[in-house]
Amino acid sequence: MAQSGDPIIIPLYGVAIHEAVCSGDLAKMRAVARQAEEHLQQAGNVSAALEALKLEIAKAERKSGG
Amino acid sequence: MAEPVRRPARFRSEEDFRRHVPVHVVWEITLACNLKCQHCGSRAGRPRPNELSTEECLDVVRQLARLGTREISLIGGEAYLRRDWTEIVRAIRGHGMYCAMQTGARNLTAERIAEAVEAGLQGIGVSIDGLPELHDELRGVPGSYEMAIQALRMARAAGLRTSVNSQIGARSMEQLPAIMDRIIEAGATHWQLQLTVAMGNAVDNDALLLQPYQLLDLMPLLARLHHEGSSRGLLMVVGNNIGYFGPYEHLWRSLSQDFSHWTGCSAGQTVIGLESDGTVKGCPSLATVGYAGGNIRDLSLEDIWNTSEALHFGRLRSVEDLWGFCRTCYYAEVCRGGCTWTADSLFGRPGNNPYCHHRTLELEKRGLRERVVKLREAPKKSFATGEFELILEAIPGREAEAGQLAAAARASGSEALVHIGGKRRPSAGPAADEGRVPPSLNLCHACNRFLWPGEQNCPHCGADVAKAAEAHAEEVRHRRALIAEVEELIRQAKENRAGQPEGAAV
């Protein structure tokens, strides 16, 4: 069962707690999802480049009468 | 596995509570201000007649360092209107304490920021209470919104940590999503929210106050913004007058795998508020009258901190000091009536706080709601309070249902119309010379409400607490396995890319 952790006390008129960072599974999953999206984006670029390459191959083949 | 959390200076350990370490100090170094805020509790504007000298301020810094303070927030008024403010910053940093400033940012120029950075300032919090038109109206100065946003950008460019504080009132609530968009764009990483409190100018302008029943709309909105902000690099932090113990409590105060919750007003236990004339309080926001523990010109800060009863109410308060709904609440012993400042400013005594999510939900179940109505204006003094009446009434459209309950309550002679009965942790008082370590509650993983250890069934949703915990543990295992799997796939993909020589495909 979850137990409570470090008490954080925020006086009303004062600066926000700058040193705190969000952690835990949800933050981790978001970070990993971002990395995966970046990877897919890169893969997407390859995919787009491959399509362009195939188009150029087809053009070149037509030009050379292949 | 999740990454470990850096431990901020402001986090309290049990030892801090036991030894009454004033971990965080909020210090009004001047009451001079160049804004005219409609909600200003301290009615800032002119400096106090007898503000501390530079040497006295430097002595305060030395005394705080001796007491174990780890973080000091400089406020005003407007802190940078004091000519020697960077000298104070330098002294604080010289003792290794974290130092940041909260500001309205009017005329906070790049030069001023550069001087502060050079002195060692580490962070800045800018107050933004609405979109441009509303912010400028609330702050009383045209163009103040733009200056605040510019200050955020300049501070970030200068290498400072940057946050925003926003007050939530009747008019600003609906603007919160748009405010969040704008402050993320300006580079804020932390967003502290608090409800506008009926003190000083806010009593004069009481239409700015949110009504307690509006928490029913506000809290789900804040939960949504909390998640949205988190995925966009902004950590929402709620102030001590937002909560308590509704279904989102674990969101507000948990930054790691732990599930933290509100643990009661800590004024005078681990927090000090200092006024610019040397007056010492247990919290910077509290009224001066009734809460001033002394002045550092008369006694050392250490003596005031250790001996003043006016500071120690937070150390001594028990359930017996609560009244109204709060006295019979399931969370009474851990919550102790929520924010002292909020309740005391409304009713002239702490211990019954209608700005509570648990309370509004319990009332709402029975067709009831609460609102506050001003009875008496506040004197024209800094940190002055007026008087408000608490009205309990039927939610429009649910009069018959609420009427039946009220009649039943009258017939039974019950003072509190609604409450969840349940177990309370037996009070085991601390040793006479030790501070009280706040109780820890468990979380019901079926409904996300906190409950006292030992509960077999959740008093809120009726779930079998152990079974819900087991199901949650299984979800956590699955989630972590998935994280590991995706991380491994990404690692392999990166390795594959790195293994391919450049131009190999051509």
Image: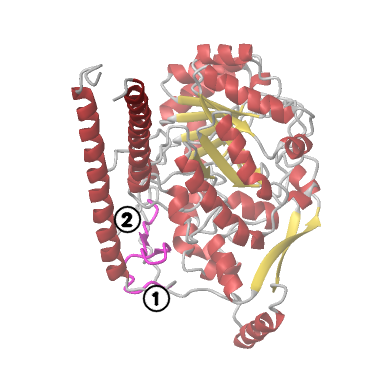
Q: Position of residue B236 (x, y in %)?
A: 51, 42
Q: Position of residue B213 (x, y in %)?
A: 65, 63
| Quadrant (top left, top right, bottom left, bottom right) of the N terminus of chain B | top left
Return the residue at label 1.
Answer: B462
Q: Quadrant of residue B116?
A: top right
B78 shown above or below B86: below
Q: Chain of mark 2?
A: A
Q: Around disc 1, counting alpha carbons within 10 Å, would you say few (fewer than 14), some (14 to 19), or many (20 or more)?
A: few
Q: Around disc 2, counting alpha carbons within 10 Å, would you say few (fewer than 14), some (14 to 19), or many (20 or more)?
A: some
Return the residue at label 2.
Answer: A3
Q: Residue at x 22, y 23 (%)?
A: B498
Report whether mark 1 lies on the same chain as mark 2. no
| Residue B279 in view, yes or no | no
Q: Residue at x 79, y 30 (%)?
A: B141
Q: Is residue B275 left or right of residue B429?
A: right
Q: Position of residue A28 (x, y in %)?
A: 33, 42
Q: Main secondary structure of the magenta part?
A: loop
The boundaries of the magenta stretch are: B437-459
Front one among B242 and A31 = A31
Q: Quadrant of residue B133?
A: top right
Q: Callout 1: helix, strand or loop?
A: loop
Q: Is residue B249 magenta?
A: no
Q: Quadrant of residue B178?
A: top right
